[in-house]
Image (tube, grey):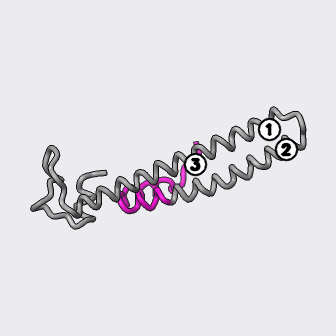
Amino acid sequence: MSLSAPIGECKHDPDVCGLDLPGEVPLCPGCREERQHHRATQSLIRRELLRLARKWGAADRRAKRADRISDRQAAEMQRWQAAGEFHGLQSDLAHFQLTLLRITLQHEPDALQQHIKDGLRPRKAP
């Protein structure tokens, strides 16, 4: 996050804020609130990503366990359960990606627009 982003979005008071000064100078109330919000958002994103990774690992282990089960019916049930878990996780990942896009749109709208344009541009066949 650049230091200029909170200044434009919060109630920055340059007379009392130490945001632009080196060292441990106290921030103004507006910048302090923005920084706390930013840290809370980072924490939520980190927790969600870890949750998704753990669930993905559990579904992957279930799918691999199915290959070691000798009872065909039980193995098939494990495969179906793993497939259902993966399907749910794909939806969760899509929602997570939308959250990241919203954050990007808020902080880097021009870069996001350029990446989308580049991604949608037709490619010439090699």
Q: Which quadrant of the structure image shows residue 103?
A: bottom left
Q: Is residue 11 magenta?
A: no
Q: Cα distance, mark 2 to mark 1?
A: 7 Å
Residue with the most extreme left position: 15
Query: Between disc 3 and disc 2, whose residue precedes?
Result: 3
Q: In this view of the protein, which residue sits in the foreground, 11 or 118?
A: 11
Please tell me which residue is depicted at 25% across the width and 58% down the height of the picture.
32
Please tell me which residue is depicted at 79% across the width and 49% down the height of the picture.
80
* 121 relative to 34 in the view: left or right: right
Q: Cα distance, mark 1 to mark 3?
A: 21 Å
Please tell me which residue is depicted at 76% across the width and 36% down the height of the picture.
65
Where does label 1 land, which residue?
66
Residue type, label 2: Glu
Is the C-beta separation of discs 2 and 1 under 8 Å? yes
- Please state the horizontal and vertical placement of residue 41, each as a whole percent of the image: 40, 56
Specify the label residue 76 is tagged with: 2
Element type where label 2 sits in the image = helix
Range covered by the magenta-colored residues: 99-126
Residue with the most extreme right position: 72
> Label 1: few (<14), some or many (≥20) within 10 Å?
many
